[in-house]
Image (cartoon, grey):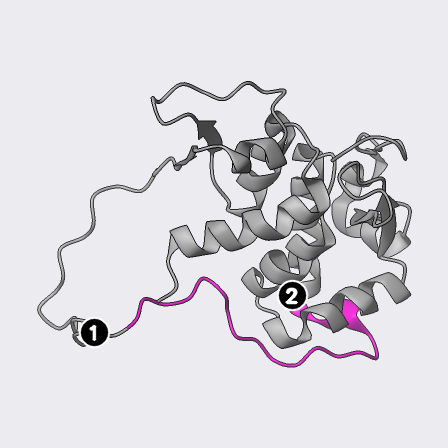
Amino acid sequence: MHTWKSHLRSVLHRLVRTHGGAKLSDIEHLLAGVLDADGIDFRAPDGTLLPDQTTLAAALDLPCDVTIRLQLHNHAPRPAASGDAAPPQGEPAASRFREGAPVDQADISRDPRFERFIREFARLEKRHEFMWAGYIVRELLPRLGFNPEEAKLVLDCLRSEHYVNITKVHNPKNPDFPATGVKLNREHEVVRALLGAQGETHPHEIASGESL
């Protein structure tokens, strides 16, 4: 059964391979974006926060707890109307991934999901210095309605049309295997038109020797 715990473990195991040497303060920001959470904390078993300078690899070698903070803004649930059907017993919860139509490889910008991707990517890029390609493929694109099986193809289409640029960032944990990042091409005329004034803003660029 897929749970938040198993999902988080899977994300952490993938992340430690590319960002094991990154500081927890950076990892917490990245994970908050991946999980769409308000905050992530790594804590010792006694509840104290692990030092920000601790690397992800070191934290996972120690007994530690991961706390996910979610701020719920919605009001109390509306009482069910008499005509509302209750979900069948044992029916699985709806996935946060939306199953969508196949992508139009000839012109992805005509896809209604394209604008949602550009705007959401621009928002996340302002919050996080590094946008991991694995997060785009496994989390962001499926959450916006692209079929998970096509996510890599979608990213390749976005790259080939120069809506995004693929970057390689030094990976201190495995120097021979740099981390793959994605950056929005804010100079592209279509991206500029969608973002308006936002398109003039360039987020902080990571130097080749920086981690995460």
Which residue matches tag 1? 90
Identify the residue at image location x=91%, y=46%.
Answer: 187
Quarter of the image with the C terminus in it: top right
> Which residue is depicted at the point 39% across and 53% down?
4
Q: Nearer the viewer, residue 206 or 189?
A: 206
Image quadrant of residue 89? bottom left
Find out whether the residues at labels 1 and 2 contact each other: C-beta distance under 8 Å. Answer: no
Disc 2 on helix, strand or loop? helix
Residue 49 located left or right of residue 179: left
Q: How far from the left and from the top, in percent, is residue 31?
A: 56, 41
Query: Magenta span covers which residues?
Result: 92-112
Q: Is residue 99 magenta?
A: yes
Location of residue 7 in the rendering, given as x and y in whole percent from the top left corner: 46, 55
Image coords of residue 201 (percent x, y): 81, 33
Name the dominant secondary structure of the magenta segment: loop
Quadrant assignment, res 157 = bottom right
Q: Dot 2 corresponds to which residue?
A: 113
Please tell me in which quadrant of the rendered image residue 156 appears: bottom right
